[in-house]
Amino acid sequence: MTNPITLYGIPTCDTCKKAQKALVAAGYSVTFRDLRADPLSEAEWAPLLAEFGSRLVNRNSTTWRGLNAWMKEAEADAQLLANPTLMQRPLLSDGEKMTLGWDAKAQAVWGL
C-alpha cells in the first residue's frame, strides 16, 4: 500500500485535474490542497523550496505577467508567499517523494 498523495494546485488547473484523475484511476488516495483557498505557510514552503528552488515559480502564468518589477526580482519564497498561485503545478508529495509538473518523468515516479 502506498502513502496517500497530496496534490498542491488550484481547482481550475487542467493539469491538476488530469494528474488527480490519473492517480485516482491508478488506485492512489489523493488529497487536493487548494493553494488559493488554503495557502501554504512559510514553514510549509521551506521543504518545497529546498527541493525545487526557483523552479517552483511558474514564469509563464498570467499571475507572473501581472507582477510588478520589484516582485519579479524578489526571491522565490517571497513571490510564493505573496502569490501562492504562482507555483508550478501540480506538486505531488507522499511524504517520501515529490514531483513538480505532470510530464512523463513525474508520471513515472508515481508508476504511471
Image (cartoon, helix red, strand yellow):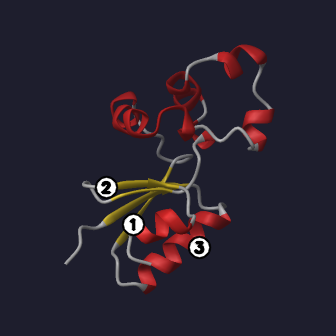
Nearer to us of marks 2 and 3 is: 2
From the viewer's perspective, is 70 left or right of 26?
Answer: right
> Who is closer to the viewer here, 31 or 38?
31
Disc 1 marks a residue whose amino acid type is Val
Disc 3 marks a residue whose amino acid type is Lys
Mark 3 to mark 1 CA distance (whole Å): 16 Å
The crowd level at tag 1 (other Cα within 10 Å; few <14, some 14-19, many 20+) is few
> Who is closer to the viewer here, 70 or 37?
70
Residue 88 drawn above or below residue 67: below
Horizontal and vertical percent position of residue 68: 77, 20
Q: Can you tell which mark lies on residue 97?
A: 2
First along the sequence among labels 1 and 2:
2
Horizontal and vertical percent position of residue 57: 60, 37
Q: Residue at x 39, y 28 (%)?
A: 42
Disc 2 marks a residue whose amino acid type is Lys
First along the sequence among labels 3 and 1:
3
Horizontal and vertical percent position of residue 97: 31, 55
Question: Mark 1 highlights which residue?
Answer: 109
Mark 1 to mark 2 CA distance (whole Å): 8 Å
When asked about the image quadrant of residue 87, the answer is: top right
Mark 2 to mark 3 CA distance (whole Å): 20 Å
Are the residues flagged by discs 1 and 2 in contact, CB closer than 8 Å? yes
Q: Secondary structure at mark 3?
A: helix
Residue 55 drawn above or below residue 2: above
Nearer to us of marks 3 and 1 is: 1
